[in-house]
Image (cartoon, rainbow, N blue to C red):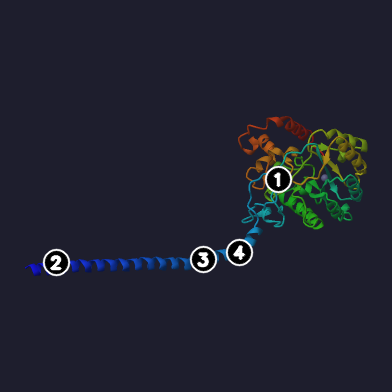
């Protein structure tokens, strides 16, 4: 019994020993499996991730230069200009479908208020035989002006002066091709046909630098336009990215004022910031030409700076037809009134009036007064 018990105890120890060996072996196997598996998985992951990273870096190496050429998205900066025009060109019918090239090149964005003591000389109805002399006067004082141009039969030998105007650094904009009120204001179709003719001429002579703004013959609010056509024309031009300037100082040269009167009218008008002065450059306006140098000297002596319109100046303070134009700007993505004038026209725009801006009330009153008092002219 004792032997058997002793043997049994021995056997028991052996069994325990075998168990330990089995457990140790299992642990070793398990460790090998775990380590090997981890190593294998790691390698697998590395093998997969390496080419992916290589592809990504290769792709970014290719993409990077291209990305730098992509136009930066609009930041909403009010002073930003040059964004692409936003316009729907599909499913258009009637006059809206015509003149597929007749779209402004860029959106304007938010307009600026008039700069302090700045004068914008504008000349309508050119070019003419007087254009080279006018450009010489402007050059003498290094002054840039804005020309609202026409293409009437008597101008056929002068049209090439548009290029001189452009090359002098002045701005070329559409006034009208034929300048015949009855014809151009008969319908929106008729207006567009005339506008397109002049636009294409200017685009050709200026290598594509016709301004995105124009001036209505007779101003934006004149009795030759019936109300429905008036509204329709403005709406269509805004849709195409074009807007217009009237003026706040009339030299009255269109009404036959003599040289002294022209000078007096302009000098008297130089009293607020950002005066847009209406003058003419047709062949018969020699009195105007004779006074331009005097006007510039008078302005310079009184601390004014002369500039050409570049499309950034808020046109609403010179607009005779604000009640027609302003509501049409409401949903137009290409134009936005300056902050001051958004407040001024809040009711027309359908926006709550801004709480600030009261400090500008005197300036706005002046603008309104000027606008109201200058409904005539050409
Ligand atoms: Zn005119």
Give ligand 1's quarter of the image: top right
Indicate whether 225 appears above or below 368.
Answer: below
Residue 61, disc: 4
Position of the N terminus by quadrant: bottom left
Q: Secondary structure at mark 4?
A: helix
Q: Label 4 to label 3, Cα distance in Å?
A: 14 Å
Helix, strand or loop at label 3? It is: helix
Query: Is label 2 or label 3 in front?
Result: 2
Q: Which mark is residue 153?
A: none
Please name the residue that numbered disc 2 is placed on.
9
For discs 1 and 3, the disc positioned in front in the rendered view: 3
**Distance from label 2 to label 4 (Cα)?**
76 Å
Residue 207 falls in image quadrant? bottom right
Q: Nearer the viewer, residue 358 or 33?
A: 33
- Packing grade of label 2 (10 A; few <14, some 14-19, many >=20) is few
The mark closer to the camera, 2 or 4, is 2
Disc 3 residue: CB within 8 Å of ligand 1: no
**Nearest the camera: 257 or 143?**
143
Residue 144 picture location, percent across and down = 84, 46
Disc with the residue nearer the chain's start (2 vs 3): 2
Q: Nearer the viewer, mark 2 or mark 1?
A: 2
Where's residue 341, x and y in %? 69, 37
Q: Which mark is residue 234?
A: 1
Mark 3 nearby-residue class (10 Å; few <14, some 14–19, many ≥20)? few
Ligand 1 within 8 Å, label 2 CB:
no
Describe the element under mark 2 as helix, strand or loop.
helix
Query: Which mark is first along the chain, 4 or 2?
Result: 2
Tell me the CA gap for discs 2 and 3: 63 Å
State the quadrant of the C terminus: top right
As measured in the structure, the alpha-carbon distance from the residue carrying label 2 to the one carrying label 1 is 113 Å
Q: Earlier in the sequence, mark 1 or mark 3?
A: 3
Give whichever of discs 4 and 3 has the lower sequence position.
Answer: 3
């Amino acid at each position: 019994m004792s032997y058997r018990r002793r043997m049994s105890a021995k056997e028991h120890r052996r069994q325990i020993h075998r168990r330990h060996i089995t457990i140790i072996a299992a642990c070793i196997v398990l460790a090998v499996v775990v380590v090997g598996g981890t190593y294998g998985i790691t390698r697998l992951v590395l093998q997969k991730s390496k080419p992916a990273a290589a592809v990504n870096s290769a792709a970014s190496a290719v993409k990077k230069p291209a990305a730098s050429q992509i136009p930066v998205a609009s930041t909403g900066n009010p002073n930003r200009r040059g964004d692409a025009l936003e316009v729907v060109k599909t499913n258009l019918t009637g006059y809206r479908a015509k003149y597929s090239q007749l779209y402004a090149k860029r959106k304007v964005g938010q307009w600026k208020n008039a700069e302090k003591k700045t004068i914008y000389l504008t000349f309508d109805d050119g070019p003419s035989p007087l254009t080279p002399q006018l450009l010489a006067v402007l050059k003498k004082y290094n002054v840039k002006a804005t020309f609202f141009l026409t293409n009437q039969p008597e101008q056929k030998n002068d049209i090439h002066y548009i290029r001189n105007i452009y090359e002098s650094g002045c701005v070329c904009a559409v006034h009208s091709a034929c300048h015949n009120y009855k014809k151009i204001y008969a319908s929106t179709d008729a207006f567009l046909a005339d506008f397109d003719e002049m636009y294409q001429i200017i685009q050709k002579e200026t290598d594509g630098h016709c301004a995105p703004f124009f001036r209505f013959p007779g101003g934006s609010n004149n009795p030759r336009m019936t109300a429905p056509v008036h509204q329709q024309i403005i709406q269509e031009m805004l849709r195409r990215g074009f807007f217009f300037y009237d003026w706040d100082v009339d030299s009255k040269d269109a009404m036959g004022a003599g040289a002294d009167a022209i000078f007096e009218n302009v000098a008297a008008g130089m009293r607020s910031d950002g005066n847009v002065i209406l003058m003419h450059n047709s062949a018969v306006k020699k009195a105007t030409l004779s006074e331009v140098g005097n006007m510039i000297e008078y302005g310079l002596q009184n601390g004014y700076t002369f500039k050409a319109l570049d499309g950034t100046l808020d046109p609403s303070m010179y607009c005779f037809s604000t009640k027609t134009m302003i509501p049409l700007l409401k949903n137009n993505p290409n134009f936005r009134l300056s902050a001051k004038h958004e407040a001024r026209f809040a009711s027309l725009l359908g926006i709550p009036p801004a709480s600030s801006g009261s400090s500008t009330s005197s300036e706005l009153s002046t603008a309104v007064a000027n606008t109201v008092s200058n409904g005539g002219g050409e």
